[in-house]
Image (cartoon, rainbow, N blue to C red):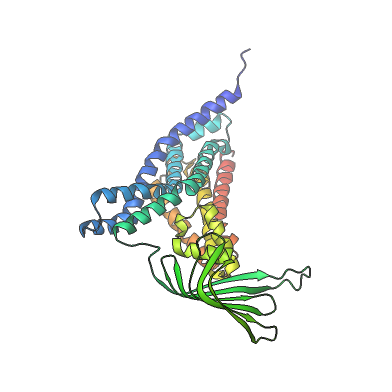
Amino acid sequence: MKKINIFTQISLLERYLVSQLITPLLFSIVIVTVVAESIGISFEQFRFLMEKRLSFDVLIYLHILKLPEFIIYSLPIATLMATIFTYQQLSRNTEIIALQNCGLSLYRLVYPAVMIGLLLTILMLILNEVVVPPANYKAAITLEKHLNISRENIRIHDIFYVQISQNNTDDIVSKSKYLKYLFYAKELTERKMKSVVLLIRDNERLKMIINSKFAECHSEEYCYFYDGNKTIINTNGSYGKNLKFHKISLYLPNISSQFKADREKLDHREMSLYQAYQQLSILETAGDHQNFIKLQVHIQKRFTSAISSTVFAFLGSAIGINLKTRTKYNSFALTLGIILLYDTFQLITGILVVSENILYGWVWLPNIVGTSIAGYLLIRKNSLSLI
């Protein structure tokens, strides 16, 4: 008797389903990317082209640099569209029913789609970390250069940097936070901060005041103060010794990091996850709670956006499977409606998290809801097919 290798049969089935998915997926990625990029950056840049502020070759170069970001944006949408279309076509050709009659459950049929979604999730995480941030930064710098704008030369007035520290004590009740450094500069031009005041205190009182004509933070850890004086504050709060100096250096790693971040002015789309977590640490130490929450939400959205490819693959295949072959629907219109609902849901949860009405973990809710709906549809359709 000839042995039947079930693993070979399953492998052939999965290969067939993947082959049916690949073409619609690639087509959808191209279409969505072109449309998204055209809407996202083309109109404004074409205006610059018409005003002769940008040359045509620079415009093409900017489009190439922005392409990875829009590919990332298109992957979840393309996955949803491709899975709905493919499984709808398989249902229409009664292939789903035929495979079920061979003893295969619907869970087995959606497995290849979910695996493709998972691979796209991994790809999105890699691109979002390695390719997209430097490409976005290069695009922004290139555009600013041709528009005669320099981030470092933008003058900023009334700069405040603070560092919040925690009491070093074993008493849990006494572990309160206090202001350790308050740094003020009247003006920031290029790398120099002018008319600088630095207040230094411990958890009990103000200890020292430093005034200087200007200050620089060249390294990651030290700030240099020039032509000023430092005033020691006595324990009773009165002014003590007043010492003049030509140049002094102070170990201020957090203040220096805040200055570097201000000078670079990186947008969250130009940061890798490593840079984003570094910035998060700076914001926490600086006590900038509002921007801390916003950046925290952005970091979570990077993960939720990547996971949405897997969620949409699951949801699209569950929707696309149709045991009633006479029932027809437009996969493009359905995709558009789902994406609109998903983005609206995500926007609302993001606003509620930033306003601190709900915890930041709630940004995962759209993906959880999408997975739940897909699971419900698949279980229901699979149980109906067994009747």
Q: Nearer the viewer, residue 159 or 136?
A: 159
Q: Nearer the viewer, residue 231 or 192?
A: 231
Q: Nearer the viewer, residue 78 or 208?
A: 208
Indicate left or right for 143 with 326 as reference.
left
Q: Residue at x 39, y 50 (%)?
A: 70
The relative height of residue 196 versus residue 97 in the rendered view (above or below) is below
Indicate left or right for 351 with 144 as reference.
right
Q: Residue at x 67, y 75 (%)?
A: 202
Q: Residue 247: x percent and y percent? A: 53, 70
Q: Residue furthest top?
A: 1
Residue 194 in view (yes/no): yes
Q: Nearer the viewer, residue 287 or 223?
A: 223
Q: Residue at x 44, y 33 (%)?
A: 20
Quarter of image, res 44: bottom left
Q: Residue 249: x percent and y percent? A: 56, 67
Residue 355 in view (yes/no): no
The relative height of residue 117 versus residue 218 in the rendered view (above or below) is above
The relative height of residue 15 versus residue 294 in the rendered view (above or below) is above
Q: Residue furthest right?
A: 171
Q: Residue 327: x percent and y percent? A: 43, 44
